[in-house]
Amino acid sequence: METTETTENYAQPSAEPGLILTLEAQSYLREAGKWANFLGIVGFVLCGFIAIIALFAGAMMSMISKFSPDPMAGGMLAGMSGLITVVYLLVALVYFFFSLYLYQFGSQIKKGLMFTDTGHVTIALGKLKSFFKLWGILTIVVLCLYALIIVVAVIFGAAASSMLNK
């Protein structure tokens, strides 16, 4: 039995660009780059605020727990302080990457359009792709968490209902 190999010929991209941006399209990208830079910088600042809040939120929760009249509630508040710190730091980290991708897109697209450099434009569009990919992944994670919360709430509701009917 003789095997035959099949080879497929893929068209190689030509050296000439297949897509030419009009002046209007370049203007839109330049404007988007300015806004992306602005949002990236503001995002970095907010990231810093969130991280600072994360570091002090745990200490504040511990301090509040000392003044609680109920020792059980005070203990729960003190125990939650570490969790709150970790959650806020994770939020700051995710927000940092959103800001970073936006800032990098803005910087690269402005350079690419200013110097008519395809390399910078390609890098910029790659950063924009990464921004939307991160957004999509985060959306999927949040939707899964919502679904999990709904399932757990239904299970607990059914269990509580069955306990009341007994």
Image (tube, rainbow, N blue to C red):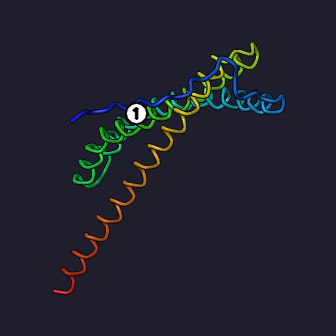
Q: Residue at x 46, y 29 (%)?
A: 52
Quarter of the image where the N terminus is located:
top left
Q: Which residue is drawn at 49% across and 44% down?
A: 136
**Residue reaching furthest to the bottom:** 165
- Choose between 4 and 76: the one closer to the eye: 4
Instruction: Identify residue for label 1.
Output: 89
Q: Position of residue 150 (x, y in %)?
A: 35, 65
**Residue reaching furthest to the left:** 166
Q: Position of residue 101 (x, y in %)?
A: 55, 28
Give the quadrant of residue 157.
Answer: bottom left
Give the quadrant of residue 39.
Answer: top right
**Residue reaching furthest to the right:** 23
Badge 1: how crowded within 10 Å, few (<14), some, or many (20+)?
many
Q: Which residue is drawn at 66% across and 22% down?
A: 121
Q: Is residue 87 left or right of residue 13?
A: left
**Tag 1: residue type?**
Leu
Q: In this view, does 126 lie to the left or right of 139?
A: right
Quarter of the image where the C terminus is located:
bottom left
Q: Position of residue 149 (x, y in %)?
A: 34, 60
Give the quadrant of residue 18.
Answer: top right
Q: In this view, does 45 lie above or below 142?
A: above
Helix or strand or loop: what does disc 1 sit on? helix
Q: In this view, does 142 lie above or below 50?
A: below
Q: How many marks?
A: 1
- Choose between 66 and 162: the one closer to the eye: 162
Q: In this view, does 147 lie to the left or right of 95?
A: left
Q: Residue at x 27, y 33 (%)?
A: 3
